[in-house]
Image (cartoon, rainbow, N blue to C red):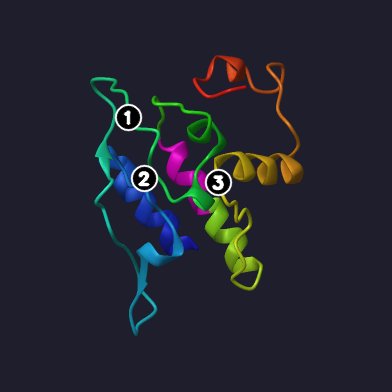
Amino acid sequence: MQQLLCGLAFCHSHNVLHRDLKPQNLLINTNMQLKLADFGLARAFGIPVRCYSAEVVTLWYRPPDVLFGAKLYNTSIDMWSAGCIFAEISNAGRPLFPGADVDDQLKRIFKMLGTPTDATWPGLSQLPEFK
């Protein structure tokens, strides 16, 4: 877990969002060194501010704001995925939120973490896919 966070810190300190963290994109060699892999969806972030695609990150590791269609995001996109991976490791390899589609994914997240409101998540109702 420490190596994953160090790898993310390196990427983020160089203004790179991985945008597709999942167990399949973590490589571990015989010396137990972890390497981040598959930077096919990675993008630079920062200056200038850009809109990104909401069609990133494998569904089970996609953060709620992106599930709601957010196209402006930052390093939190990778941190949510890392948290999901940590939970999966702690849960004998079972994914924390194995949703079948976007709606099911959101239901699973909110069942475990509670349903947000505009009071608890300012701007929630302004997200493109919020219903």
Residue 123's disc is none
Residue visible at 61% across and 16% down? 125
Mark 3 vs 2, N-terminal side: 2
Q: Nearer the viewer, mark 3 or mark 2?
A: 3
Mark 1 vs 3, N-terminal side: 1
Question: Label 2 crowding class (10 Å Cα cut-off): few <14, some 14-19, many 20+?
Answer: many
Locate the C terminus and report the quarter of the image it occupies.
top right
Question: Label 1 crowding class (10 Å Cα cut-off): few <14, some 14-19, many 20+?
Answer: some
Report which residue position mark 2 lands on: 19
Report which residue position mark 1 lands on: 52
Identify the amino acid type marked 2.
Arg
- Span of residues in magenta: 75-82
Residue visible at 66% across and 43% down? 109
Q: Look at the numbered discs 2 and 1 and tell me whether their residues touch, using CB distance below 8 Å.
A: yes
Question: Label 3 crowding class (10 Å Cα cut-off): few <14, some 14-19, many 20+?
Answer: few
Identify the amino acid type marked 1.
Tyr
Q: Secondary structure at mark 1?
A: loop
Q: Position of residue 74 (x, y in %)?
A: 40, 32
Residue 101's disc is 3
Q: Nearer the viewer, residue 93 or 129?
A: 129
Check if residue 86 falls in the magenta segment: no
Q: Position of residue 98 (x, y in %)?
A: 60, 56
